[in-house]
Amino acid sequence: MYRCCMFDLDGTLINTIYALTYTINLTLKKYGLGPIEDEQTKVFVGDGYQKFVERALRYCGDVELAHREDALMTYDALFKEHCLYRIEAYDGMKELLDALKAKGIKIAVVTNKSHDRAIENVEIVFGKDYFDRITGEQEGVRCKPDPAMALGTAKALGVDPSECLYFGDTNTDMKTGINAGMDTVGVLWGFRDREELEAFHPKYIIEHPGDILPAIEAAE
């Protein structure tokens, strides 16, 4: 029986691609670099904003990362301003979350997005106090695919990792669930493709949020 469903944020709960690409291109423009397209952003994100900025800089020609430190500060400042740009929940996500809550299943967000931005994104799209717990990147907490955030969430919510489903759209998410001892759900509406997810043998792969409900009900 599953007592908790944990969700990655970008590319899983919320389509944030426009905000991410818009902000990184503003950052790159400062150094006469870029722009990049949404398709590059989808590949570069998933491991925290520092890796995102580094990958974008290298892709655009700053191979030695000469602008890294300033670019990180620039991106962080700009993202505070633009992180809500054109963001929206994926079709069917709110209906899935409502169904889980109606079953008494706890719902949580576990993301490598900065903690403050994660809370801001989630509360704008889903409302305040809708999720049982939101955990994002913060000092002193190891990022995914380290299981620390997922395991900390399970402990805080009083559930065993074996009672959790972890949803995500990237290899980082699949590794996180595996490392935490949780069943994983690969979602195909996000930033990566089926081949990347299948390489980590998730328990389920779904094309629409509601597709997971029969499996959850069968496990009750």
Image: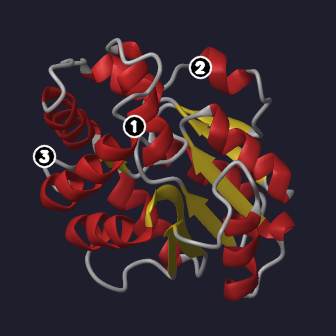
Question: Which amino acid does the dot numbered 3 rest on?
Answer: Arg
Q: Residue 116 appears at what percent x and percent y?
A: 36, 72
What kind of element bears circle 2?
Answer: helix
Q: Which mark is residue 165?
A: none
Is 80 located above or below residue 196 in the figure? below
Relative placement, left or right, of 85 versus 116 is: left
Identified at 44% across, 32% down, the residue is 54
What kind of element bears circle 3?
Answer: loop
Identified at 21% across, 29% down, the residue is 28
Is 86 located above or below residue 37 in the figure? below
Question: Which amino acid does the dot numbered 1 rest on?
Answer: Arg
Image quarter where the C terminus lies is bottom right
What kind of element bears circle 1?
Answer: helix
Image quarter where the N terminus lies is bottom right
Q: Residue 65 appears at what percent x and percent y?
A: 43, 27
Badge 2 or badge 3: first in the primary sequence:
3
Q: Which mark is residue 68?
A: 1
Question: Which amino acid does the dot numbered 2 rest on?
Answer: Arg
The residue singled out by tag 2 in the image is 194
Pointer 2 with pointer 1, Cβ within 8 A: no
Q: Residue 51 appears at what percent x and percent y?
A: 50, 38
Is 81 located above or below residue 210 in the figure? below
Of residues 55 and 92, which is closer to you in this image?
55
Of residues 32 and 166, which is closer to you in this image?
32
Callout 1: few (<14), some (14-19), or many (20+) C-alpha neighbours within 10 Å? some
Callout 2: few (<14), some (14-19), or many (20+) C-alpha neighbours within 10 Å? some
Badge 1 or badge 3: first in the primary sequence:
1
Identified at 39% across, 14% down, the residue is 59
Relative placement, left or right, of 153 versus 115 is: right
